[in-house]
Amino acid sequence: MMANNKLDDNEINALMVAYAESKDSNINPDRQSKIFKFLILFINLYVFFVLALYVLFRSNLIQAVDTALIDTDTSVLLDGRAHTFFWIIMLMNISVYFNIGFRLLCIIAVVSLLNTTLDYLVLIPGVFSFYERPYFSVLFASRPLLIFAIAWVGFSYKDGISGD
């Protein structure tokens, strides 16, 4: 016969109290500056619009002027980079909430974005052509702004644990 694995009320209350204490001690959004909050909002909106553009492109709702973007090797590259970018930003949002490893994820995001930008310049020749690739050219032209914003967020981040 199986053992009774259900939690009783005392155990559930103990878990809720322990989580509430942990949450209160780890999260203090009032410590972050307004610039930090603005940059986090900017980064999330940028990612939302980039991923929305990518989804529209992948579902053929935006016509590709350059047919080289539709070829399988390029779309595999775009798929991989989009998924990596999405998960890094998701982990950054989670880490800023739980106050765990945010600066490390900012460094990883900056390195990943720099690597992605260099890969696109090498693997997709003429990527900055506003005539042939207008949507992606706008994305790549604004990429330094995103890299700067993520670096600035990493530098201006204040740990929420210390009480000063």
Image (tube, rainbow, N blue to C red):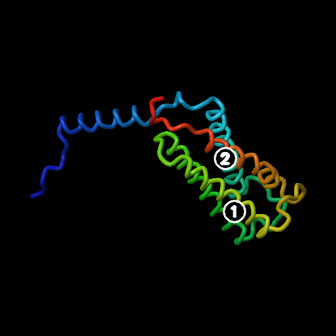
Kindly identify the amino acid type of the residue bearing the numbered disc 2: Ala
Mark 1 Cα-neighbour bin, 10 Å: few <14, some 14–19, many ≥20: few
**Is label 2 in a helix, a strand or a loop?**
helix
The answer to whether 19 is drawn above or below residue 84 in the figure is above
* Residue at image point 86% right, 64% down: 126
Kindly identify the amino acid type of the residue bearing the numbered disc 1: Asn
Q: Which of the marked residues, 2 or 1, is nearer the chain's N terminus?
A: 1
Residue occupied by mark 1: 115
Q: Where in the figure is residue 32, as x and y percent of width and height?
A: 57, 32
Q: How many marks?
A: 2
**Is label 1 in a helix, a strand or a loop?**
helix
Residue occupied by mark 2: 151
- Quadrant location of the N terminus? bottom left
Front one among 21 and 2: 21
Q: Which mark is residue 40?
A: none
Q: Is residue 38 left or right of residue 71?
A: left
- Pointers 2 and 1 in contact (CB under 8 A)? no
* Residue at image point 81% right, 51% down: 141
Mark 2 Cα-neighbour bin, 10 Å: few <14, some 14–19, many ≥20: some
Q: Where in the figure is residue 62, as x and y percent of width and height?
A: 76, 53
* Residue at image point 40% right, 34% down: 25
- State the CA–CA distance, disc 2 to disc 1: 15 Å
